């Protein structure tokens, strides 16, 4: 009876996940406007006021709104060029460090003052990296410093990519609005502007709906993993003599988590950067999500196999 209850609970969770996936697909936005949707969300995430201004613009004030955000985007593009230089400098420095070994470390360190002067000439963080490397006294101490620089580079790179994507999306939105503004026919201009604004509002509703489904799916996934661990521990306490099977299951969970950590990307997402996460912390999150997916998949397969085996036994 107890095993049947466990199977029913896991089965219900799995069915809910499947229903969510179907509902998510059914309520998805028009696939033909996918690129426009992504661009609108990138702009909304970093500059919601820009989207709001375009949503409420009229044919009379549209030129002013366009001019405002053209200037703003141009200013961000100018800053982006400096960010790209910082990223490229840090990448070059990181390659220097990764190419060092026991045979060339001492020579690089003795010439570091000259190398750093040229490499960090246009960097805002020159002193930070000069002081950091000067504290590396031997090749054996280099790995920890490389990890620090690599984490810095990942953050700088990800910030650069996020900003680059924003500028590209913002320019696309501005260009769309500018084409509407230059339309000769007043009626067509009004109709095109209304359609443009309707899309922006629709994208916002779609994003909210998708976030709801994603969060709910993660909750169910974590619930499935938690139930799995709970039933394992419960059975371990009730049947201590056969607990080696339960321990094996826990070891497998640890192995799955470790695999998820190894294959997880260290490149931080925009939300991870905003949360102040490190590369290692982000890999831990990837490992947890991977473990949840594996647990849900195994639960579904187990249910299907059990149903088939029971059907075969009952037939015989």
Image: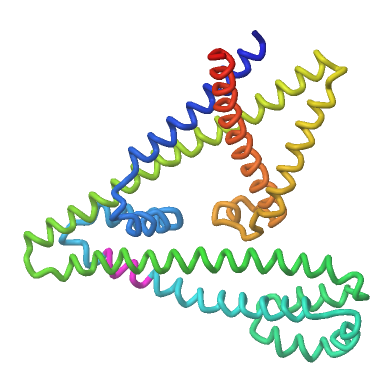
Residue numbers of the magenta segment: 65-71
Q: Nearer the viewer, residue 104 or 141?
A: 104
Q: Is residue 34 left or right of residue 305?
A: left
Q: Is residue 198 left or right of residue 117?
A: left
Return the x and y of residue 142 as percentages of the image width and height.
86, 71
Q: Is residue 116 left or right of residue 196?
A: right
Q: Which quarter of the rendering shows the N terminus?
A: top right
Q: Residue furthest top?
A: 1
Magenta stretch: residue 134 in it?
Answer: no
Residue 263 sits above or below residue 12 on the image? below
Residue in the picture at 56% in, 76% down = 84
Describe the colour scheme in one phrase.
rainbow
Residue 229 sits above or below residue 276 on the image? above
Return the x and y of residue 56 as percentages of the image width and height.
25, 52
Return the x and y of residue 174 as percentages of the image width and height.
30, 66
Residue 69 sits above or below residue 29 on the image? below
Residue in the picture at 39% in, 45% down = 207
Q: Can residue 239 be seen in this snapshot?
A: yes
In which image quadrant can residue 175 be found?
bottom left
Q: Nearer the viewer, residue 307 or 86?
A: 307
Most common SS among magenta residues: helix
Q: Which quarter of the rendering shows the C terminus?
A: top right
Q: Is residue 32 left or right of residue 46?
A: left
Residue in the picture at 63% in, 44% down = 290
Return the x and y of residue 239 as percentages of the image width and height.
82, 15
Residue 223 sits above or below residue 294 on the image? above
Residue in the picture at 31% in, 46% down = 29
Q: Residue furthest front?
A: 316
Magenta stretch: residue 69 in it?
Answer: yes
In which image quadrant can residue 41 be found?
bottom left
In which image quadrant can residue 191 be found?
bottom left
Q: Can residue 223 be seen in this snapshot?
A: no
């Amino acid at each position: 009876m107890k095993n049947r209850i466990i199977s029913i609970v896991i089965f219900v969770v799995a069915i809910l996940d499947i229903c969510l996936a179907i509902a998510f697909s059914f309520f998805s936005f028009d696939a033909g406007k996918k690129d426009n949707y992504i661009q609108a969300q990138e702009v909304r995430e970093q500059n919601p006021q820009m989207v709001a201004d375009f949503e409420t613009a009229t044919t009379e004030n549209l030129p002013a709104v366009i001019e405002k955000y053209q200037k703003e985007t141009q200013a961000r593009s100018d800053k982006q060029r400096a960010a790209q230089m910082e990223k490229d400098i840090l990448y070059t420095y990181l390659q220097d460090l990764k190419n060092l070994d026991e045979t060339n470390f001492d020579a690089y360190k003795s010439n570091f003052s000259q190398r750093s002067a040229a490499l960090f000439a246009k960097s805002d963080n020159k002193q930070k990296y000069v002081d950091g490397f000067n504290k590396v006294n031997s090749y054996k101490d280099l790995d920890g410093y490389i990890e620090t620089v690599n984490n810095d580079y990942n953050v700088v790179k990800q910030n650069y990519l996020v900003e680059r994507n924003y500028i590209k999306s913002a320019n696309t939105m501005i260009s769309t609005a500018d084409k509407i503004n230059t339309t000769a026919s007043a009626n067509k201009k009004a109709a095109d502007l209304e359609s443009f604004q309707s899309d922006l509002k629709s994208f916002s509703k779609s994003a909210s709906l998708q976030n709801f489904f994603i969060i709910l799916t993660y909750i169910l996934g974590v619930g499935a993993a938690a139930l799995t661990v709970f039933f394992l521990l419960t059975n371990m306490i009730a049947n201590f003599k056969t607990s080696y099977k339960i321990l094996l299951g826990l070891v497998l969970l640890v192995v799955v988590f470790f695999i998820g950590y190894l294959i997880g990307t260290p490149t931080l997402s925009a939300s991870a950067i905003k949360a102040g996460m490190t590369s290692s912390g982000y890999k831990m999150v990837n490992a947890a999500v991977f473990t949840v997916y594996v647990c849900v998949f195994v639960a579904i397969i187990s249910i299907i196999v059990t149903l088939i085996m029971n059907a075969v036994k009952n037939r015989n």
